[in-house]
Image (cartoon, helix red, strand yellow):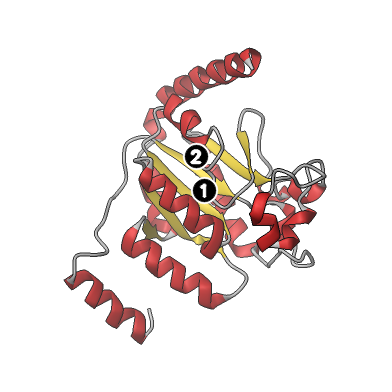
């Protein structure tokens, strides 16, 4: 933490910001936009998120070991971009993320396993215009642990909505990244002051270690969700 952050943090705390919302009892891992269009540095939307992907992979292992749910968020548009609204006008590079393109697929370094859900969005927040909240509630999730990119965009927007939907919201500092350090650090500071607890990978893994004994219950909850999800898709 640099000088301005320390000074501002103390001022915020004196004024009643930066409390701790903490963890709940039933977490899910939300991996936001770690898709090829963002994780390939050659992409106009991309950056080098190798270390953040490695941190996410460690969280995947912990969640899988405890049979806890993992949800991946991707972003994809119709070929005529009619579903992109003003977001695509504001950020024209988003036009490369057309449905069916490899750029919209989750990075191979954190490849989803069968049974792990993928949710497609159109805008910054993982919750906006998606079934994510209904999905998490069907699993009785009360805690969203978040990794992904970018910190200043889709992580921030998703963290705000996660709070507003009533979830304990945890942003894993080691697992989120941005294209530049300035927006990254400023937004982590602000997210931690107002919307979510920004924590280390080590702290999160310690919390998840407490779920090993409850893996059987979590597996049953996951089976309940799978039945609900299949019923929903059939009804649609």
Q: Which residue carries the number 2 mark?
A: 63
Q: Is residue 4 left or right of residue 157?
A: left
How many numbered discs? 2
Q: Can residue 67 be seen?
A: no
Residue 42 x/y as whole percent = 79, 67
Question: Camera-side residue: 53 or 65?
Answer: 53
Could you tell me which residue is drawn at 57 percent across and 53 percent down? 124
Q: Which residue carries the number 1 mark?
A: 59
Q: Is residue 199 left or right of residue 151?
A: left
Q: Does 122 sit above or below residue 175?
A: above
Q: Does 119 sit above or below residue 205?
A: above
Task: Say what secondary structure mark 2 lies in.
Answer: helix
| Mark 2 surroundings: few (<14), some (14-19) or many (≥20) residues within 10 A | many
Q: Is residue 39 left or right of residue 51?
A: right
| Mark 1 surroundings: few (<14), some (14-19) or many (≥20) residues within 10 A | many
Residue 200 x/y as whole percent = 42, 61
Q: Which mark is residue 137?
A: none
Residue 207 x/y as whole percent = 36, 47
Question: Camera-side residue: 212 or 136?
Answer: 136
């Amino acid at each position: 933490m640099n000088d301005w952050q320390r000074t501002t943090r103390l001022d915020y705390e004196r004024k009643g910001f930066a409390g701790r919302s903490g963890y709940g009892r039933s977490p899910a891992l939300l991996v936001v936009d770690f898709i090829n269009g963002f994780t390939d540095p050659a992409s106009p939307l991309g950056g080098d998120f190798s270390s953040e992907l490695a941190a996410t992979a460690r969280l995947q292992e912990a969640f899988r070991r405890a049979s806890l749910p993992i949800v991946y968020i991707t972003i994809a548009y119709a070929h005529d971009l009619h579903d992109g609204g003003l977001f695509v006008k504001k950020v024209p590079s988003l036009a490369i993320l057309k449905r069916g393109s490899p750029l919209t697929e989750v990075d191979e370094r954190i490849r989803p396993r069968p049974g792990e859900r993928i949710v497609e969005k159109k805008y910054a927040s993982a919750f906006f215009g998606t079934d994510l909240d209904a999905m998490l509630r069907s699993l009785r999730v009360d805690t969203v642990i978040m990794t992904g990119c970018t910190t200043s965009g889709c992580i921030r927007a998703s963290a705000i909505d996660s709070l507003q939907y009533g979830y304990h919201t945890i942003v894993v500092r080691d697992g989120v990244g941005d294209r530049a350090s300035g927006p990254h650090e400023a937004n982590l500071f602000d997210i931690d002051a107002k919307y979510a607890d920004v924590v280390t990978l080590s702290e999160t893994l310690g919390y998840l270690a407490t779920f090993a004994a409850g893996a059987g219950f979590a597996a049953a909850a996951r089976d309940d969700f799978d039945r609900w999800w299949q019923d929903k898709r059939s009804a649609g």
